[in-house]
Image: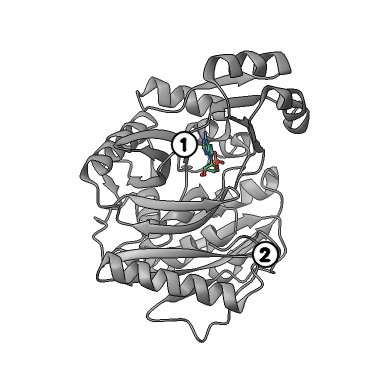
Amino acid sequence: MRIGIIGAGQLGQMLGFAAQELGDSCRFLDPSPSPPAAVAGEVIQAAFDDPDALAELAASSDVVTYEFENVPVAALLAITDQVPVYPPPDALHHAQDRLAEKRLFDLLDIPLPAYRDVTTAADLQQAAAEIGMPLVLKTRRLGYDGKGQLVVREPRFIASAIEQLGPVGLIAEQWVDFDFEVSAIGARNARGDVVIYPLTENRHADGILRQSRAPVENPRLTSLTETYITRLLAHLNYVGVLALELFVIGERLFANEFAPRVHNSGHWTIEGAVASQFTNHILAITGRELVLPELRGHAGMVNLIGAMPPADGLPGHARMHDYGKDPRPGRKLGHITVVARSVANRDCELAEIVDFVTESTMDSGPAP
Ligand code: AMP
């Protein structure tokens, strides 16, 4: 099939490779002159909401999908008469607005940290009185990788916090002193078949994902996350891959956010599962049978941020992915995956990789 992909970053690149393996072809829409996905298909170079470019992409595709969340929903709606667009634009609408997203979690009985809709300093004062401090103040829209958010620890910082992030719609969210963070990645096709990857543990620094490990061997947490993601997928009449991120405290889970797309915390699935999240996304949006994501071992992934290490000298059986981007501080340039027979071996190999990356690069971010 011919797949149109809005966005041609690394997620588009990995989707493109998965599509090629399945015998499908991809065409991308992206404003950058040489985006990472250019190695996996032709790129129409235009703004994401350029009506002519969207119409051209739609006309030459059997199905259109998107690889990042800031595509205007209106751009998707403009082509839904021409071509099926998956995941459904309504899912994107909810993911783009933290307030709509949190209300959806509430509606579906998915536990989440207490939150308040905030615009002014008086609103934040009121929210702080109700949900306590510290709290996390986040812009409702256009936040990613920790951008558009800050922690407010004391009442005296309320006015400056509003000034820093405003004047836009904001969310005040209870600070969660979590044990660790996890994500559940699931795929659903139009027939309603669902597959869910084993639970992944994620470590962030400065709001950016640094490492993932899977599977999290906790049956209670696994079954709860499966319940929550299945509810989301069914409610949204979802088609494609969706990632749900949650905080863990003891045996309890609190939803943070969901992404209506393939997700960085699922990159390990390329080597660590018999079918990757990219393969299942392509299978889902093209109306095919999904593949049960059986594991090949204990997987770990380290993001390469700001600088790439040399390709030779990688320890063990590690596999490095280079997105082909120009280095820039804080930029995700690639990742390294390991798959091991045991948790101990996996963690040992991950530690070696982190040392190797730290020593061989001038990593601009904190060590993973
Ligand atoms: P987000 O952009 O909402 O995914 O936030 C990025 C990262 O910031 C999360 O993965 C957490 O590590 C941290 N974070 C976000 N919200 C909270 C919260 N309410 N309490 C504690 N940490 C948070």
Q: Which residue is mark 2?
A: 364
Looking at this view, name the residue that lies furthest to the left.
219
Label 1 amino acid?
Asp
Q: Position of residue 296 (x, y in %)?
A: 26, 67
> Mark 2 or mark 1: which comes first in sequence?
1
Relative side of 25 to 23, left or right? right
Q: Is mark 1 within 8 Å of ligand 1?
A: yes
Question: In this image, 274 relative to 136: left or right?
Answer: left
Task: Estimate the x, y position of residue 67 in percent, counting from the top left.
Answer: 53, 51
Residue 309 sits above or below residue 270 on the image: below
Q: Residues within 10 Å of mark 1 (few under 14, many from 20)?
A: few
Q: Tell me if I can see residue 238 in this picture.
A: yes
The N terminus: image quadrant: bottom left
Residue of label 1: 177
Q: Nearer the viewer, residue 119 or 271?
A: 119
- For the residue marked with disc 2, what is the amino acid? Ser
Q: CA distance from mark 2 to mark 1?
A: 27 Å
Residue 239 spot, x, y in % from top left: 38, 42
Is 300 on the left-hand or right-hand side of 75?
left
Whether 357 is drawn above or below 127: the answer is below
